[in-house]
Amino acid sequence: MIQFLLNQTLKSESAIDPNTTVLNYLRRDLGRCGTKEGCASGDCGACTVVLAEPDGDQLRYRSVNACLTFVSALHGKQLITVEDLKQQGELHSVQQAMVHCHGSQCGFCTPGFVMSIFCLQKNGENYHREQAQQALAGNLCRCTGYRPILAAAQQACEGKTPDSFERDQQQTLQQLRTIPAATPLEAAGKRCLLPQSLDELATLYQQHPQAKLLAGGTDLALEVTQRHQDLPLMIAIGQIEALKQIRRHNDRLIIGAGAALSDLYPRLADYHPAFGELLARFASQQIRNQGTLGGNIANASPIGDAAPLLLALDAGLMLRCGAVRRELPLNDFFLGYRQTALQPGEFIESIVLPGQAPADFRAWKVSKRLEDDISAVCGAFNLTIEQGMIRDARLAFGGMAATPKRAILCERQLVGQPWQPATLELAAQALAQDFTPLSDFRASSAYRLLVAQNLLRRYFIALTEPQLAIEVTAYE
């Protein structure tokens, strides 16, 4: 059984199909149709709702895509939809701002925008345009009304007034803290197990190696919403706090596989600005609030944005099967298209990074849209340069092969050579031997190869002429 608050109403669900998304639960089971279905793939934001959960002595609010969130993720949280915003029969300040600024045209996307701005208003003390753009990057308006919507966000954040959520915060916290641990969901021949600890997860997964592990679910849910398949057995890991921890140990940065990408952002931006810049372009805020670094790696997608950076940084994985742990270099993890070195019943417990990122590390993502888009090519570069000579090189790319992959021949062309344009040109030509990328609707093979070569040239510029590199970035 799972329990959660629907605004201020305690809901308990035990006999519900665990394949049910929050979107379908709201519309079909509760008749709450303010939350819209636009794409059922987490791309448009029309289905945005907000989840609140305890964070110390206050609530933390997260915007999520209801179409990609299974009902099991609601346990222990407060679910807020657009229907809950009215204040004693009047519009909420966010809704009123949308009216004042003429932010709604056809209106279909408006509930999603309202909920994203509501979340921004709740979490932010001061309005910053950049934060508003990040918060709204996952919401698409097909009427091209972004300017007035951004104006509404500014008005809502700068002119916010106390509301029922603020007044009821302590009551909400108390109610959420009294909710007991979840028990398995089962209906229609499908089950979702909800372990509370790492040991329980290890035991369950060893007993049920055929189960699908459910972390953020931003990719797994597509099996249900896009491919119309059933997931007969899932093991949800969202209740396991040990998988969300980020810590330093023995001069290494250890990231729990279940930590949300939005929680990782400040830590990895501090670890190296290049990592922070790429995470800021990782899908949308709604996806980053749910997606996990461990899930992004275990998914083994050739266009997963995190893997090239981790490969270039020589990251490792701590894997666990039952009581047995083993550490594996990420370089040995990807075996083929969506194939990994994980054994039956084995899962990623944490990602291990060197304690300090190299100063000369850089990474860039190239995609059709700046935000909320999958990369055509993602490149990460980590060279050790001493006295004008390249002593070591680690280059990795996504979108160039069946797996995220290092450019081994290019690296060999670089090591031991002088740090100069002629060396980079020879290394760029070696990339054509490292990769034979596919052509698809995102980019042609020739384009991908040229982009990869140009990213290598950009790396040289970034290290030798940083001001020029800044101007290039600003132009993009």
Image (cartoon, rainbow, N blue to C red):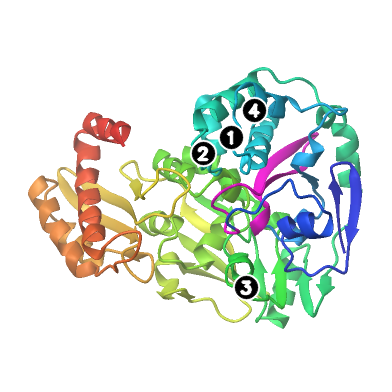
Q: Earlier in the sequence, mark 4 or mark 1?
A: 4
As rendered, which of 109 and 74 lies closer to the eye? 109
Mark 3 vs 1: CB contact within 8 A: no
In which quadrant of the rendered view does residue 148 lie?
A: top right
> How far across and down, in percent of the image, does residue 218 sit?
59, 59
Of mark 4 and mark 2, the one earlier in the sequence is 4
Q: Secondary structure at mark 2?
A: loop
Q: Which residues are magenta?
A: 40-68
Q: Residues within 10 Å of mark 4 (few under 14, many from 20)?
A: many
Q: Which residue is mark 2?
A: 143
The answer for how far apart the CA atoms under marks 3 and 4 are is 36 Å
- Residue at 56% x, 49% y is 44
Question: Marks 2 and 3, how far apart in space?
Answer: 30 Å
Q: Regarding mark 1 in the picture, which secondary structure is present there?
A: loop
Q: Which residue is mark 4?
A: 98
Q: Are marks 3 and 4 in contact (CB under 8 Å)?
A: no
- Of labels 4 and 1, the one closer to you: 1
| Label 2, label 1: how far apart the Cα atoms are | 7 Å
Helix, strand or loop under label 4:
helix
Type of residue at label 4?
Answer: Met
In magenta segment, residue 63: yes
Given the current orientation, which residue lies at the most extreme left position? 422
Q: Is residue 161 visible?
A: yes
The residue wearing badge 1 is: 105
Say if 204 sits above or below 313 in the image: below
Relative vertical location of residue 420 with respect to residue 12 in this rendering, above or below: above
Q: Which residue is mark 3?
A: 228
Mark 2 or 3, closer to the camera: 2
